[in-house]
Amino acid sequence: MAAPVLTDRRARLEASPLRHLDPLLVCIPVALSATGLVMIYSSTRRRLADAGLDPLTYVHRQALAVALGVAVMAAVMAVDYRRLREFALGAYLAVVALLVAVLSPLGVSVKGAQARFDLGPLQLQPAEFAKFVLVLVLAAYCGAHRGDLDARRVVAALGIAGVPMLLIQAQPDLGTNLILGIMTIAVLAVAGARARHLVVLALAGLTLAVAAVQLGVLEDYQVERLTSFAQSGRDAQRSGYNQEQSKIAIGNGGLRGQGLFSGTQTNSAYVPEQHTDFIFTVVGEELGFLGSAPVLALFALLAWRTWRVALLANDTYGTLCCIGVLAMLTFQVFQNVGMAMGIMPITGIPLPWLSYGGSSVVASFACMGLVANVHMRRFT
């Protein structure tokens, strides 16, 4: 009996990478973004209404960023990730140029940091896109030298990461640099850098951090924010105020929470920067432990799926791309939630997809699109 002949349409469907799409890699970021829209509305509606502004102002802006982020994720998924490697150097140079430009009069200075361009209702923060681009470039370089990462090549990789990090620190933005540093170490470790080189790198990083504090490289407010979590209650009216109010808000939530839009600290606007850095306090206060646990579970599931894709990837480049994204995701979630709970220092790191910020949302979607891309093409 002759084998059935596939129609052209079915044949294209069978050969399409979409057949191997992991839906969780797409659905979880969208679900987290939807949750973020609700939390942003809860944390800003009262303040905006009191100022005579539309309570949905931030929600509309964030929704626009989410829509753009989904489109960018789809675009990243549409192009074979191995072809993205060919454009990595150009993207890297473009991001470096933007980081230089944002330090010029073209950039906008807000609260002592010159880190963004204002583009109508949206703001462009080049440092956020440096995360995605650095994953592409480091994965390409380290993948090409996997198993042969001697001291010279490790230094070259550090130089690749160091250029944007120096420009970002000039803004200054310590939080983003911590993320880029963690990503760099993770990619080097999985690419086969020698243990002694990683130890030397860790010691050098610790030495530089101490020197930065002692020599005044960091701004005074940055030093206070980094150390205030270890001195709980001793400086509750200055650098420790944000974290004290954050812990009170989460403590108010208890097991079941105070109810959506009913948070005491949230409605009273006691937690500064609540819709950005401290968005998790809204989840904790209004939804309680029973509402916070599913949110963290979604992040954990997303991290596991990313790790799984790294193991399934059929080439080193794909594996290293996933490892870079995994390092970024896990560190941001751990640091942000830990900061809100008072067990980690305040660094200004957003919670992916939940915190208000268009550039962060778009960059996070792009990174997850890259992981989905690797999974879709693991057989080709």
Image (cartoon, grey):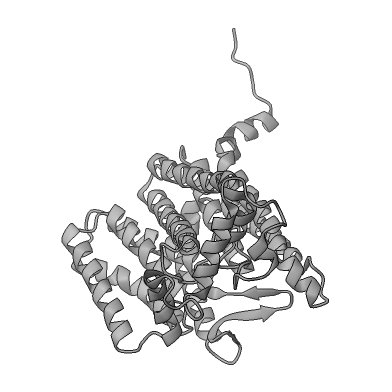
Q: What residue do we see at 41% from left, 74% from top?
A: 228
Furthest-bottom residue in view?
105
Quadrant of residue 169 in the image? bottom left
**Above or below, comparing residue 242 to residue 39 in the picture:** below
Image location (x, y in percent) of residue 161:
37, 71
Q: What residue do we see at 45% from left, 83% from top?
A: 221
Res. 150 in view: no
Furthest-left residue in view?
196
Q: What residue do we see at 41% from left, 62% from top?
A: 343
Furthest-top residue in view?
1
Image location (x, y in percent) of residue 35:
66, 52
**Above or below, comparing residue 172 to residue 376 in the picture:** below
Res. 125 in view: yes
Image location (x, y in percent) of residue 220:
42, 86
| Pick the front one: 163 or 338 | 338
**Above or below, comparing residue 78 to residue 343 in the picture:** above
Q: Quadrant of the N terminus?
A: top right
| Pick the front one: 253 or 111 | 253
